[in-house]
Amino acid sequence: MSQTITLYVDGACKGNPGLGGWGAYIIRETGEEKLCGGEAETTNNRMELTAAIEGIQHCPTDAKLIIWTDSNYVKQGITEWIHGWKKKNWKDVKNPDLWKLLDATCQGREIEWNWIKGHAGHPGNEMADQLANLGAEKTLEHIKQAASSTAEVPKKKAEPDWLLNDPFGLEFADSEDEAEEISAESAIDAEQIDDITIEQQATNTASTLNPDASTQSKQAAEIHPMIVITPATVDVSGPRQLILDTETTGFYFQDGDRIIEVGAVEMINRKLTGSSIHIYINPQKPVGESENIHGISDDFLKDKPLYAEIADVLFDYLKGAEIIAHNATFDMNFLDMEFKRAGFVALSEVCEVTDTLAMAKAKHPGQKNSLDALVRRYEIPQRDRTFHGALLDAEILSDVYLAMTGGQVSFDIDALTHSQNEDSSQTRAAVEIELPVILPSADELEAHETWVKQFEEKHGTPCLFAK
């Protein structure tokens, strides 16, 4: 071996998924090197893997590499789990493209993999973390420059989506222009780039559909810019259902664990309206080992609002709706505790609650009923859930709930004639039809008996149609 090289690699993600960056701090016998980069829309795990790949590829193939990562996902994946993944031909593996690339990059090299606790003050790990965040910042700068150099951001025509639109054409937009005005979300963070006019157009269109959600969004921004309420883009009337998920610092609300993330999506008459709420919350305590589950670090949460600062906006958004959650007891216990601590009544007192885990156990007794298992069972397109994000899990659960309860589209005459029924201008009358009864003739009965006897003689068994 010509030399020994030490690498500290790390990834960062603002949102998970969201803007991300990776960093590799390389220490050679002759000096140091610092590498970084990023992507506009990615996940923390992908950035952790990319950091390792880029760092290794930058080093000579004949050098011994000592790699330090604060990601157990990367360390255990490349040293333990990858052997099983290969045997099952990468089935159900998240980020298979990067794992295959990392595996190929490691071939023929001598590598020693080590785990190090993140954000614990180790100089090498701290430098890698700084580089990862720098990579994200540089990526954001590139996005800003690209946006500012473009005179007009083109509108993206909304593509049909059976989860959001009526697949049978039962509802129509007033005009083609109106349908095109509901644009796809901009991939650029609206808080950081205010000169993009397309977002204003989308917001104005959504506000006409749901003025209450628009007001909530403005109130949220006034309290804290990190409360994100998306107005509805589909005009539907009826009782609200909110598919909800939370992330916490631990499993026991009685022992002082706190909520760090809340995400919920709105559904009315089995149709997703496009409205959602998403909030990160500073728990005022370390997240501890729960970071391995949700990937949200203490450093990420330090500038986020306290629960008391967002409680009124969140309570207003949730109250009166039917809350749908997977293992709802867990989420509701935490939400009740947090709202009581902030001076509100328990959320369970003002909301009906539906537990999809209990539904799944009743529907599929003796089987696995985790969210991942239900996604596979109902053949719902899989998304990266290596880390559990509240809004992502809520979106996935909405697909699962609709699949478990019979799909999204329902021919509900009351829903289709909602406006007529409101002013009692139309009523439904029962339709009575007398069906004719045709009896067999004597010849037909005799022919039937003859056929039955022939069948029994030929097969030696009684005929199904015998009297």
Image (cartoon, rainbow, N blue to C red):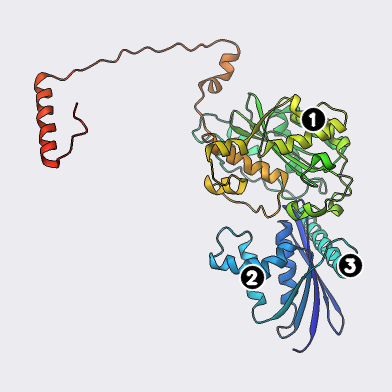
Residue that mark 3 sits on: 122
Locate the C terminus and report the quarter of the image it occupies.
top left
Q: Earlier in the sequence, mark 2 or mark 1?
A: 2
Packing grade of label 3 (10 A; few <14, some 14-19, many >=20) is few
Mark 1 residue type: Phe
Sequence-wise, which precedes: disc 1 or disc 3? 3
Residue 149 visible, this angle: no
Type of the residue with mark 2: Leu
Q: Residue at x 83, y 60 (%)?
A: 133
Q: How many numbered discs?
A: 3
In the rendered image, which residue does mark 1 sit on? 315
Quarter containing the N terminus: bottom right
Front one among 435 and 344: 344
Of the two numbered discs 1 and 3 in the rendering, the one whose residue sits closer to the viewer: 3
The disc label shown at residue 101, or none: 2
Asked if the residue at tag 2 contacts the one at tag 3, i.e. Cβ–Cβ closer than 8 Å, the answer is no
| Percent x, y of residue 291 | 78, 54
State the image coordinates of residue 224 (x, y, percent, origin top left): 87, 39
Q: Amino acid at mark 3?
A: His
